[in-house]
Image (cartoon, helix red, strand yellow):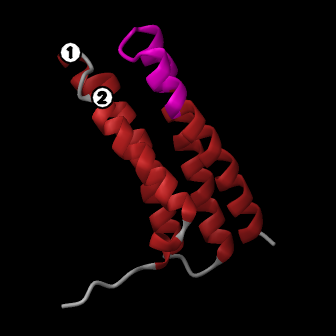
Amino acid sequence: MTYQKYNFENLEIYSLAEEIVLKIYLTTKSFPKEELFVLTSQLRRSCLSIVLNIVEGSSRKSRKDFAHFIDISLGSLFETKAILKISLKLEYLNKNNCNDLYKQIDLLFYKLLSFKKYLLK
């Protein structure tokens, strides 16, 4: 059986979002065990939501519908950044690691905005 490549896999925003998810999953492995069902879980779900909404939006028939899912991805991106800020203040993350994630998040933010504008043209 051959592997079918879907449209979302060709999107730069998908690749960037997936990279953030992988980094966050690795990073949260070191979070305290008492945070497993709180910050760890919420951070993982919020970053995963970014990717999954890009994927789901790509399956929609209209560009307007896809743009709606990009909006949802943006909301999840903001949630992810807020949880990272809290995690840094709680000293679950070091500043360098967090700054690298912030840079990736900021880049993805601008790429998502640009892609949404493209979809709504």
Does 26 appear in magenta?
Answer: no
Query: How far across and down, in percent of the image, does residue 26 sit?
Result: 29, 35
Could you say which disc has been placed on residue 7 in the image? none
Q: What's drawn in magenta, residue-wise?
A: 83-101
First in residue order: circle 2 vs circle 1 = 2
Up the image or down, 44 lies above or below 72; here it is above
From the image, which quarter does the N terminus lie in?
Answer: bottom left
Query: How far across and down, in percent of the image, does residue 57 sit?
Result: 53, 67
Q: Which amino acid type is marked by label 2?
A: Thr
From the image, which quarter does the C terminus lie in?
Answer: bottom right
Q: Which amino acid type is marked by label 1?
A: Glu
Spatial CA distance of label 2 from label 1 is 12 Å
Which residue bears the numbered disc 1?
A: 34
Left or right: where 20 falls relative to 70: left
Up the image or down, 59 lies above or below 55; here it is below
Query: How far across and down, in percent of the image, does residue 108 sit?
Result: 60, 48
Up the image or down, 86 lies above or below 21; here it is above
Which residue bears the numbered disc 2?
A: 28
Q: Nearer the viewer, residue 65 or 96?
A: 96
Tell me what residue is drawn at x 18 percent, y 18 percent.
33
